[in-house]
Image (spheres, rainbow, N blue to C red):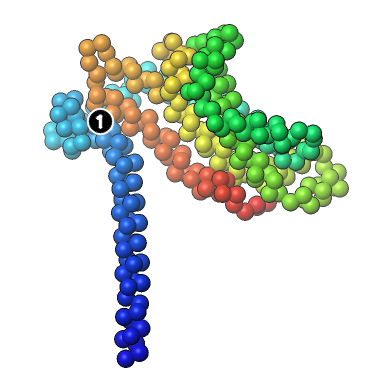
Amino acid sequence: MESTRTLKMLTPLLNERRLALLIRYAVLILLTVIVAGPVLTAVLGGMRTNGEFLSRPFDLPRQGIQWQHYTAVLKSSEFWQATRNSFVITAGITVLNVSLASLLAFVFSRVYFFGRGLLFNILSIGLLFPIVVAILPVFIQIRDLGLINSLWGVILPMVAFGLPGSVVILRSFFMAVPIELEDASYIDGCSTFGFFRYILLPLSRPALTAVATLQVIVGWNEYFLPLLVLNDPNKWPLPLGIMRYQGQYGTDWARVMAYVTILIVPALIFYVVAEKYIVTGLTGGELKG
């Protein structure tokens, strides 16, 4: 009798938990479909003819898999030129952003001076202004510096607008390093820069990796700024290379879908490999020597 009564009392609770679990899975499945839908459309679109894609954009290939769209993109010299440009832009953005952000974060976290908090708050305001909002003054500055049609005209503004977020992430991680460790390094004869170079940076590797990964993804996928700055098609990065398949009288949608699929593969692989570092770096993680 007692066990039956207990089971009756627990039944409503179990039903609520099952309902909550079903709702959770339903939401996750819906989000997965929303996120994966465009990717699957691009992958399958590159495997079909233009007629199939235009008549049934979300259907499976019915006339056999058309691999020639992928092979045509990979055999194109323009594709590999755009790939080189994307690597240069992405590497420049990542290296400069991580280097400058780590130095700024060190100053704002470990060096005490008058107005430090005010300057950091001013820098943090940059998080509220994406580059699209300030594109007109940015374009004027790029033009005045003579960087139109130069890869530096893309790299430098992207670094500048990416610094606030990177500094905020690294500063919180740097401040988690115990002050006793810094004092001990000074007692052992380490300089301020030596503490930064040989102790703080190795301990903050997860945060540095998270910042670098985010910058790689942003730099690899940037479209708007290169569109405004780069006039020479030979200097276009991969996102702009899609325009080569758009003509005056039509668009080769199958090639475009194949191109988009190839474009997202490197960023996707890089993100999957570095995912754990992103989570650790953004959540603080544990300091490891």
**Where is residue 246 shown, x and y percent of the image?**
28, 16
**Where is residue 2 shown, x and y percent of the image?**
35, 90
Q: Is residue 165 depicted above or below 10 in this figure?
A: above
For the point 40% across and 13% down, the residue is 233
Circle 1 packing at 10 Å, graded few (<14), some (14-19), many (20+), is many
Q: Which of 62 and 129 lies nearest the eye of the viewer?
A: 129
Query: Picture quarter containing residue 55?
Result: top left
For the point 56% across and 45% down, the residue is 282
Q: Which of 82 and 139 lies nearest the eye of the viewer?
A: 139
Can residue 103 be spotted in the picture? no
Residue furthest bottom in the image: 1
In the image, taking residue 244 as reference, residue 83 lies left or right, namely: right
**Where is residue 7 shown, x and y percent of the image?**
33, 81
Residue furthest left in the image: 63
Can residue 53 be spotted in the picture? yes
- Residue type at tag 1: Gly
**Where is residue 38 shown, x and y percent of the image?**
30, 36
In the image, taking residue 204 as reference, residue 157 lies left or right, namely: left
Query: Picture quarter containing residue 208?
Result: top right
Q: Is residue 121 depicted above or below 256 in this figure?
A: below
For the point 27% across and 13% down, the residue is 247
Task: Tell me the quadrant of the picture where the N terminus can be found.
Answer: bottom left
Q: Which residue is mark 1?
A: 46
